[in-house]
Amino acid sequence: MSHATSGPRAVAHPGPAPQGSIHIAGVSKHYGNTRVLSDVDLAIDSGTFLTLLGPSGCGKTTLLRLIAGFIEPSAGEIAIDGRDMAGLPPQRRPIGMVFQNLALFPHFSVEENIAYGLRLRKVGAEEMRRKVELFLDLVGLVGLGGRRISQLSGGQKQRVALARALVLEPSILLLDEPLSALDLQLRKQLQVSLKEIQKKLKTTFVFVTHDQEEATLMSDSVVVMSAGKVQQFGSPQTIYSRPENLFVAKFIGELNEIAGSVVSAGGGALDIDTAVGRLTLPAAIARGLVASAGSACLVCLRPEHIDVRREGEATPGRVALPSTVVDRIALGPVIRVAVRCGESRMTAVRLARDSQALPEVGAACIVEFDPADAQIFAPLAGEMATAFGEPE
């Protein structure tokens, strides 16, 4: 699996390396006094579908452009297939790229667009025809090769751009938010198609998005970025279930928060005062928190880890908080239940078939959870959803 390096950096150097592997060592990028990326270390394994995920301005597109060679790092090294990329222009790197605006040639047919790079490489006519037909089939455009770009739907144009990049058989394909302009249904269809194509070709995909659901659905590994730094690097499930800091926890999925202050720490437990009473929770669930008396903290819970029960139905061994139901919203197979717990508004998600056991709106209730399902974080020092002021 792809991983963030720790200890000595994975310095770019010549030598054998799997085709499609990327090593990024201590990479920073700044424009004058504006820093866009800061000391990024990543090792991306060959054949991985990796997503760079983060809010606008976090540096993810800058990192993609550095890998592509459109810009050079201010510090650090990037190696592809074990080869240092310093000073190497994009056309000499073993990469393909699908741009956000697709950059298709409107006066060319679908076949001519796909064959464009092959013509530049002076590939023979018979081989060119064979490859174009192969990739038309791969992206589901058989029979549409003679159409002009203006005659295609948005999804078909996306597939042409993908085929044009893949027909050159790069070891790495870089994709800069290529699905962002599509409607939701088409976007979901292409997410599945992209993942299937990547698995079939075993090409390394580096995909940029700000959509958490898209990243979770498509990726083997996710790099969560904020303020020009890597906040966490791991599988989608690890990032969701074991976020390393509050930014990641808030950015990936929905989060309930209870503000508190550490009263004491010892014996593997933390006593935390909150507006809904004192909570005793395992110290092991704390992330990035200096757990000393007086430390401000947030106790965080995913909606699926909360049970809403009628008064008097608390379960032994679980934390139970007195609350009031303020809303119930049916969303197909699930029901979202909003409760008021002290000064906090919390949301639980339950299966619709369990609706009969849920208290009605306005009823007093108990919110309960397993202490091991909670996570404790230090509050954010400041707003991290924007980078250093420089566009991506």
Image (cartoon, helix red, strand yellow):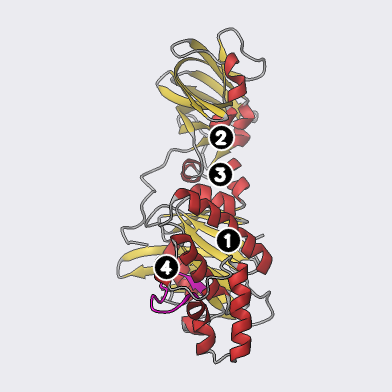
For the residues labelled 4 and 1, the Cα–Cα distance comes to 22 Å
**Residue 4 appears anywhere in the view:** no
The numbered mark at residue 151 is: 4
Q: Relative to 285, does residue 325 appear above or below in the rendering?
A: above
Name which residue type carries label 4.
Gln
The numbered mark at residue 225 is: none
Say which element carries label 4.
helix
Quarter of the image that includes the C terminus: bottom left
| Residue contact at pointers 3 and 2, CB within 8 angstroms | yes
Residue 175 coordinates in the image, percent (x, y)? 50, 66
For the residues labelled 3 and 2, the Cα–Cα distance comes to 9 Å
Name which residue type carries label 3.
Pro
Which residue corresponds to mark 1?
Answer: 194
Q: Quadrant of residue 9?
A: bottom right
Taking the spot 32% from the left edge, 64% from the top edge, the residue there is: 34
Extent of the magenta region: 96-110
For the residues labelled 1 and 3, the Cα–Cα distance comes to 27 Å
The numbered mark at residue 243 is: 3
Q: Relative to 84, does residue 297 appear above or below in the rendering?
A: above
Which residue corresponds to mark 2?
Answer: 375
Q: Main secondary structure of the magenta part?
A: loop
